[in-house]
Amino acid sequence: MTDLELELADESPEALFALFEQKGWGDGLPLVAPTKERVEAMLGAGAPCDADDVVATLPPRAGEATRRTIAVNAVLAGCPPGVLPVLVSAVRALAHPELNLRGVNATTHPVAPLLVVHGAAVAAHGFNARLGAFGPGNRANASVGRAVRFVLLHIAGARPGEGDASTQGQPSKYAYCIAENEAASPWESYPRSVGLSGGDLALGAVTVACGENPHNFHDMESEEPAPILRKAASVMATLGSNNAPVSSAEFFVVLGPEHAATIASGGWTRQDVQSYLYEQARRPAAELRAAFDVVQVRPWLEALGDDDAMPITDHPDNIRVLVAGGPGKHSCVIPSWGMTKSVTLPIEA
Amino acid sequence: MTTRILSPEGAVGPQRVALAPLPATLKGQRILVLDNGKPGAQLVLERAAEELAARTGAVFAGSRRKRTAATPCEEALLAEIEQSADVVLTGTAD
């Protein structure tokens, strides 16, 4: 038996649960035993590279994520077969410097990496981009989101109280995964909007964005874009937001298909939505200055007068727009942690 | 029947930084505060540094503030601190 193997007293779920509790592993929910056979099946035949090559080194533990250790966590989480390339791409995204995983894991703010799956991978692995995309009820969304959390808990060492200082935690720290509803989107796919193209997208793409739980906004009445988006702006510019004192912060605006259709029917592009939200999501500068002792804002925002309307984020590009969900007049805003940038990568075989 | 499973943790990579060794004595040493920018951090750390200096014969050499608690300290500031201090007090949390 190697250092990376453990022995279970028996094959029962209770024995696995007891071992993981003793080790301080897991998320408190039942697990699938990562036997060698199951892990090999998750790795798949004809893997294009060595399963023990390091994909990424994740803070704070400096844990080395390999295809094999990622596969172990995928088995634990109950992932369907074949989905490993999606997870490996997500782990690569987590390790990008601009995502600032060390800060994401260490902060007291409730922040979890949201995994958005795009393109061919959605249908190939059965991700849900439509009704109920944030859950529950879909195996791929639930288990792949859970596996991302397991990678953070086990490989990165982001355990509550040790590597994760989140004051209250949040439900999306169990699992946080959706798919983009490209079929219902009036605009080009999200990965294309951030510069990926052609062959890069043959297998699909992933976006990892570290943020709070979704903040719903609803509009049952409006037949024009502006009233819908003013409600989104109101959610973005709440004074209690962790992003209020951090001007570089991203916001993901996940539009339900009906809101997106109404907005697009007015001739608005994705860039129009970003620009309008940038203009609308503001609060009086004096109010923000009175509310926070410590701020991280661009110098030009510091130069605004107290009576000026200060934008909640310092550039329209910080407002990321995509479509997910099904019928209904609901959408959501996901404020980021602030000192993090989302990363979109193609899925590799 | 016993079952073997694989560890979900994997190996730990090489640590790129380590704590500097503690000085044998603080007497005559320059103590500098690295403020992480959180509310109250400067106050707490400076009082601690002043008290430490008073008790040990060290010298309180002032404070520096990193840009934000959310990211690592800027390289240029670290280089300057290296020239300005023998002991650095810093911390994290709110």
Image (cartoon, helix red, strand yellow):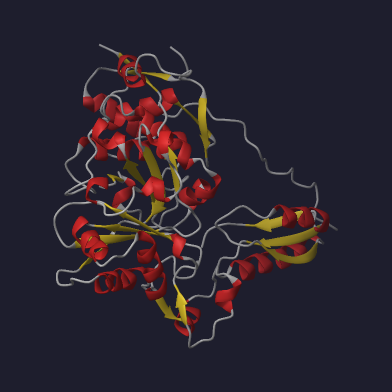
Q: Residue furthest right?
A: B28
Q: Position of residue A277 (x, y in %)?
A: 37, 69
Q: Position of residue B19 (x, y in %)?
A: 68, 43
Picture layout, residue A293 above or below residue A332: below
Residue drawn at point x = 29 percent, y = 13 percent:
B2
In the image, taking residue A247 as reference, residue A137 lies left or right, namely: left
Residue drawn at point x = 47 percent, y = 78 percent:
A310
The quarter of the displayed image where residue A24 is located: top left
Residue drawn at point x = 76 percent, y = 60 percent:
B31
Q: Quadrant of the C terminus of chain A?
A: top left
Q: Position of residue B51 (x, y in %)?
A: 71, 66
Pick the front one: B14 or A238: A238
Q: Is residue A8 visible?
A: yes
The quarter of the displayed image where residue B36 is located: bottom right
Picture layout, residue A38 above or below residue A118: above
Q: Is residue A29 visible?
A: no
Q: Residue furthest bottom?
A: A307
The quarter of the displayed image where residue A75 is located: top left
Q: Position of residue A340 (x, y in %)?
A: 49, 54
Picture layout, residue A298 above or below residue A44: below
Picture layout, residue A345 above or below residue B67: above
